[in-house]
Amino acid sequence: MTRNSPRLGRIPSILTFSLAALVLAAACGGGGGQQNSGGGFKGTKKVGYSGALTGQSALYGKAVSQTLKLAMDDLNAKGGVNGYKMEPVIYDDGTTVDKATANFRELILQDNVQAAFGPVTSAQCQATSPIAKQNKTLFLSATCNSYQLSTEPDLINPYFTSVVPNTYMEGTAAGRFVAKLGSKRTFIVSPKYLFGVSETNAFVASLKRANPSAQIVNPESTWYVPFPTNPRWDSTINAIQSFKPDLIYTNIFAADEINFVQQAQQVDPDFFKKYPFVDLSSVDELRALGNAYPIGMHLYMRAPFFAINNQRMNDFVKRYKERFNEEPSDWAVLDYDAAMMWGQAANAAKSFDADKVIKQIVGHSFQSLRGYSFTIRAGDQQADVGETIGTTADSGGKYKFPILKDAQNLKGSDLIMPKQLMQELRDGKCEKDGNPTTTDFALCPSWKQG
């Protein structure tokens, strides 16, 4: 079920509940798998998602909400979870923190969801993860990815787990990528909130380690733009033209990325030829801009289906497109993996209890649409998942948007944060005067040792 706004308290009466249970039992009599002796599901259980169906990140929320419907149907086709039919409850948060917080409270306290899928932005997850922790509800992160969600003492949540490369992993991948490109003068533009700051910090540290002579041409005070940004990007475009860098690094995304590309091309049709980009992107941005998406853009992506060729992925793409009339975005792939991981773990635990299910997640490996098994390690409960890098090129008519040429699927084991570094972050050894807002990987003792 999908709701555009949170409901006020609606607690079913015992009579209503009983009648609903009778109807459900009659309707589900033909199911298979883990079911009761009567041949049907034991009942219905719910998982929840508060996502951006509107607002800055609406492209992403749409993909996740569609995927959760498909994933729950796939679990139900195999008997459900612990014999129960699974139903997704989906709320729109408008890409705002306040609405995501209110939605999470309703999902957990009124809808009694067995697991909650994290919102799009890290700021939203920063606000909602503590709610899940307080109520002992599993929090599955497949989009928001700031490493602070699992290293900042105030945010550490024993019920949190991530199947998306975090900002350390992505920033590291981007920094190494730029170093290999040989850029000498890089311009930075990033969204000013938890995600943008932490990913940019990892990018700069990784770039300077790989290429100490690399120069960031614009002052650090100008790296960050408000999030969500003003729809106009004139000042940033003018600054790039003024500094004349040989490369721009950015992790702006969704509506911000689309607006920037369109406005820069209006200023100069050859803008992206003169100023090559290394940018975080996804199938959603490629599809939204279509043939207007610049060719020759260097992208790092989380799970582009067209660069990942295996039977599981190909089957998923086929079924997703048949149902939703479009190819799955990166977010669809990631959240499907998260949903299947949770279903497998809950069945293994023979329980929906979060303490029991998380024990079947941490330290265990799970099959992925991305062509490999991933493991959720103890400590930060982060999956060793990879990143894809490449350069945009025409798809030759296969898709209505560009794809990546020379795509490389980087290994998560090469990107995941070293445990010593993770502990130093938790101990406050990577910041100035005990101020967590000054965290810098270059300050970490193990980073300095190289």
Image (spheres, helix red, strand yellow):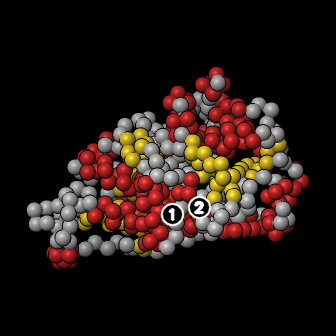
Q: Looking at the image, which residue is at 32% across and 54% down?
A: 343
Query: Where residue 189 sits: x, y (%)?
Result: 74, 52
Decide if residue 261 is on the left or right side of residue 412. right
Decide if residue 171 is on the left or right side of residue 224. left
Query: Where residue 143 sits: x, y (%)?
Result: 52, 55
- Residue 246 visible (yes or no): yes
Viewer-proximal residue, 314 or 30? Answer: 314
The residue carrying pointer 1 sits among few (fewer than 14), some (14 to 19) or many (20 or more) residues within 10 Å by Cα, namely many
Q: Looking at the image, which residue is at 70% across and 64% down?
A: 293
The relative height of residue 54 versus residue 158 in the rendered view (above or below) is: below
- What is the quadrant of the N terminus in the image? bottom left
Q: Looking at the image, which residue is at 70% across and 68% down?
A: 291
Query: Where residue 415 sits: x, y (%)?
Result: 56, 37
Decide if residue 101 is on the left or right side of residue 134. right
Residue holding disc 1:
328
Task: Give the mark nearest the N terminus, 2 or 1.
Answer: 2
Hey, what amino acid is under mark 2?
A: Val
Hey, what amino acid is under mark 1?
A: Pro
Viewer-proximal residue, 398 or 93? Answer: 398
Viewer-proximal residue, 342 or 222? Answer: 342
Res 283 label: 2
- Residue 103 visible (yes or no): no
- What is the quadrant of the C terminus in the image? top right
